[in-house]
Amino acid sequence: YRCVHCAFGELRRQPGAEIRIRSMISGSEIVLTHGPAGWSAFPADPVFLILPEKRGNCFQVHQTFVDEAEFHAYLAENPELAKQNPTPLSLDEYVEQYPALSLP
């Protein structure tokens, strides 16, 4: 998959699904797992950046970070994204908002 949003869109309803992502800041692996109780993550509190994509740039605007500090570090390195005032989403917020976030 090109980005976490693409992977989650395809796998979000599949029990047992696992998505492995690398943070663009630290390179740390983040693992999202769909178990009987819903989605969980390791490390436990990842943060998602999900902004509208333009011309297939989903990789740049759909990112997952180990924590909120990495989220803000990524925005500091990408001022054009920071201008959009994105809100860091927790895993629960991302799962809950996914249908609305996927609308064109």
Image (cartoon, rainbow, N blue to C red):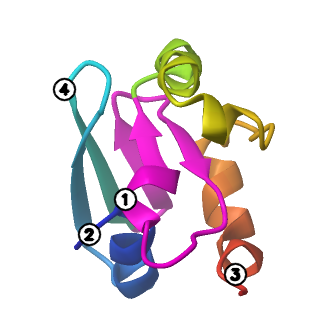
Q: Is residue 92 left or right of residue 62?
A: right
Looking at the image, do the residues carrying marks 4 and 2 touch, with CB atoms under 8 Å apart? no
Q: Which residue is mark 2?
A: 2
Tell me the kind of residue under disc 4.
Gly
Q: Which residue is mark 4?
A: 27
**Disc marking residue 99:** 3
Residue appearing at x 42%, y 52% in the figure? 60
Q: Which residue is mark 1?
A: 59
- Mark 4 neighbour class, 10 Å CA radius: few under 14, some 14 to 19, many 20 or more: few
Q: Is residue 63 left or right of residue 87?
A: left
Residue appearing at x 49%, y 78% in the figure? 55
Residue 70, compared with residue 19, is above or below; it is above
Residue appearing at x 55%, y 44% in the figure? 48
Q: CA distance from mark 4 to mark 2?
A: 16 Å
Residue 97 placement (x, y as % from top left)? 74, 66
Circle nearer the N terminus (1, 2): 2
- Mark 2 neighbour class, 10 Å CA radius: few under 14, some 14 to 19, many 20 or more: few
Q: CA distance from mark 2 to mark 3?
A: 19 Å
Question: What segment carries the magenta color?
Answer: 36-65
Tell me the kind of residue under disc 1.
Phe
Q: Quadrant of residue 79?
A: top right
Circle nearer the N terminus (2, 3): 2
Residue 27, compared with residue 41, is above or below; it is above
Residue 66 placement (x, y as % from top left)? 40, 25
